[in-house]
Image (cartoon, helix red, strand yellow):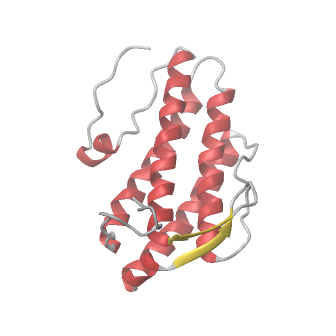
Amino acid sequence: MRGSAGEEVGVERPSSGEMRPLFAHLFWADARALDGLRTAAGNTAQALELLAHVIGAETVWLARIEGRAPELPVWPALTLDECAAAALRVRAGYEALLTRIEGDPGELARMVHYRNSAGLEFDSSVADILRHVALHGAYHRGQIALLVRMSGTAPQATDYIAWSRGAPAATRSP
């Protein structure tokens, strides 16, 4: 949380060890959402668009952290197979980043200067960007689940608690 002068108020800096489970969940949840779309009945075009956006955004944020141009835009038009391939590539990139962070936990505090998709410039810490990536994906996977359910298929569970305990959360029929 930011105070009126932009200073951090009441926010603890994460340790490098806290990021690994967030991203293990993210990788698992992206794969579950992809599998759910592969088996869904009905029209899931909007859900696919959201999943492509999740993977596109993960790609863009990783590129910003690494100071390079992204391979995908924030809203790419991808097929399910292209989503799967892009998810594998971005996973490898985040795995390498997390390994670097474990070797240098100070990397989490490093500020990244970037321009967003609206052309505005910002500076954010690596830690805040990683938190955003994890939370952004969770938000959109919830939308994907709703769209899959509306198409007549029970969505795949992608909740963090389902991942952490290895058992699905409570569900309901489509």
- On screen, residue 153 versus residue 169, left or right, reads right
User: Would you identify the image quadrant in which residue 48 lies?
Assistant: top right
**Residue 148 position within the rendered picture, expressed as x and y whole percent measured from the top left:** 54, 24
Q: Nearer the viewer, residue 155 or 75?
A: 75
Quadrant of the image containing the N terminus? bottom left
- On screen, residue 36 versus residue 86, left or right, reads left
The answer to whether residue 89 shows anywhere in this view is no
Question: Farthest front residue?
Answer: 4
Vertical order, 70 against 35 (above or below): below
Vertical order, 168 against 172 (above or below): below
Q: Nearer the viewer, residue 38 or 60?
A: 60
Disc count in the image? 0
Quadrant of the image containing the C terminus? top left
**Residue 156 position within the rendered picture, expressed as x and y whole percent measured from the top left:** 44, 31
Vertical order, 81 against 66 (above or below): above
Q: Which residue is pictured at 30% across the width and 70% down the height?
A: 17
Vertical order, 27 against 123 (above or below): above
Q: Which residue is pictured at 51% across the width and 67% down the height?
A: 94
**Residue 146 position within the rendered picture, expressed as x and y whole percent measured from the top left:** 50, 24
Q: Which residue is pictured at 73% across the width and 57% down the height?
A: 72
Q: Nearer the viewer, residue 16 or 117?
A: 117
The answer to whether residue 168 shows anywhere in this view is yes
**Residue 33 position within the rendered picture, expressed as x and y whole percent measured from the top left:** 51, 38
